Amino acid sequence: MVQDIKHLYLIGNGFDVFTGLKTRYLDFRWWLENHYIFVYDALNDIYGSDGEWWYDFESQLGKLNIENYIADYTPRYKSIEDLSKSIKEKREFENKNSLPHNVLFSNPCSSRLEGLLDILHYCFEKWVQSVQKFKNWKITHLEVDNSYFINFNYTDTLEILYKIPEERVLHIHGRASKHENLIFGHNMHLFGNLKSGHEEEMVAEILNRYEKNPFKHIPDGLSQIIRNVCNVHVLGLSLSAVDIPYLEWVLENTPADCKWQISWYTKDDKSRYYEFLINNPRLFNRCEPIQIIEESQQSR
């Protein structure tokens, strides 16, 4: 049983990148382009996924211009003759395969997007399984005793390199080695409006399946585990819009006097760090920016 936790770690992708794993979204782009070019091309056609798009891959999934997408991918209207022929062929197929008669046709735009995102999910899981190769790795110092780890990554870096017991690591978005469903996605909930048609609503519904809602993935009982922590260490999270709800939940469920450390790597990271502090002024006097340092350097 997990108890007496004094250190809480939130582990993001920057931690695995520091370790030496090729887990950046740009790495996924290159892998996808080399292994599943038809999926890469389809994404590029629908989203216009240039190099900058991939830096914020998860958030970008929710930023599809639905109106333009439907305009580009809606088939031309059929004549009465063509429509009658399609209905006849559909009825013959249903009779041949003993299927119940259904006069409804699938929505071509939402079906196309659903198929693409399902294949993308499959590719994403295949890629994660392929990158977990620990060669020439680097490690940093972690407080292993009396610690609990919320791991946003899909890899076993903590368990393999740091020997953290499994019961003290929460893979909040799934664990690849256990063949769990890997969760990725954006932070936008898309709604139709008074002018939206059925097709727009169907496309929005497909995109909403990839909404990363933190309150859906935080397990019951986690607040009890972290209620008495003295230190919160945020290592490798980019503080993107997808991350912020999780951080704010942790802030609400940890003591008001516990100390925070948040790592940064780029200037953009540091800007997001200060933006996070401005939006959460309770942390002003108890949070410091740090960089992840290799353990051998820390001892110098």
Image: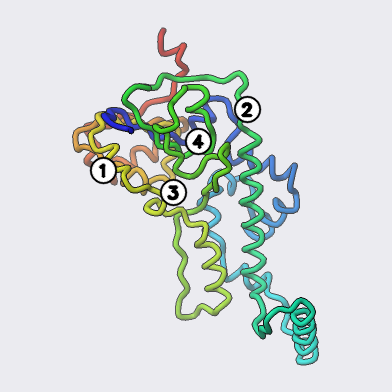
Label 4, label 1: how far apart the Cα atoms are? 23 Å
Label 2, label 4: how far apart the Cα atoms are? 15 Å
**Residue 133 pos. (x, y %):** 63, 27
Question: Which image quarter is the N terminus in?
Answer: top left
The three-letter amino acid code for the residue at tag 4 is Asn
- The mark found on residue 13 in the picture is 4
Mark 2 highlights which residue? 133
**Residue 109 pos. (x, y %):** 64, 70
Tag 2: Cα neighbours inside 10 Å, few (<14), some, or many (≥20)?
few
- Of the numbered discs 3 and 2, the one sitting upstream in the chain is 2
**Above or below: residue 19 compared with residue 32:** above
- The mark found on residue 242 in the picture is 3
Label 3, label 1: how far apart the Cα atoms are? 19 Å
Choose top left, top right, bottom left or bottom right for residue 148.
Answer: top left
Disc 4 secondary structure class? helix
Tag 1: Cα neighbours inside 10 Å, few (<14), some, or many (≥20)?
some
Is 278 in front, or is 110?
A: 110
The three-letter amino acid code for the residue at tag 3 is Val
The three-letter amino acid code for the residue at tag 2 is Lys
- Of the numbered discs 3 and 1, the one sitting upstream in the chain is 3
**Residue 161 pos. (x, y %):** 51, 22
Mark 1 highlights which residue? 253
**Residue 25 pos. (x, y %):** 58, 41
Label 1, label 2: how far apart the Cα atoms are? 35 Å
The residue that appears at 34% across and 43% down in the rendered structure is 247
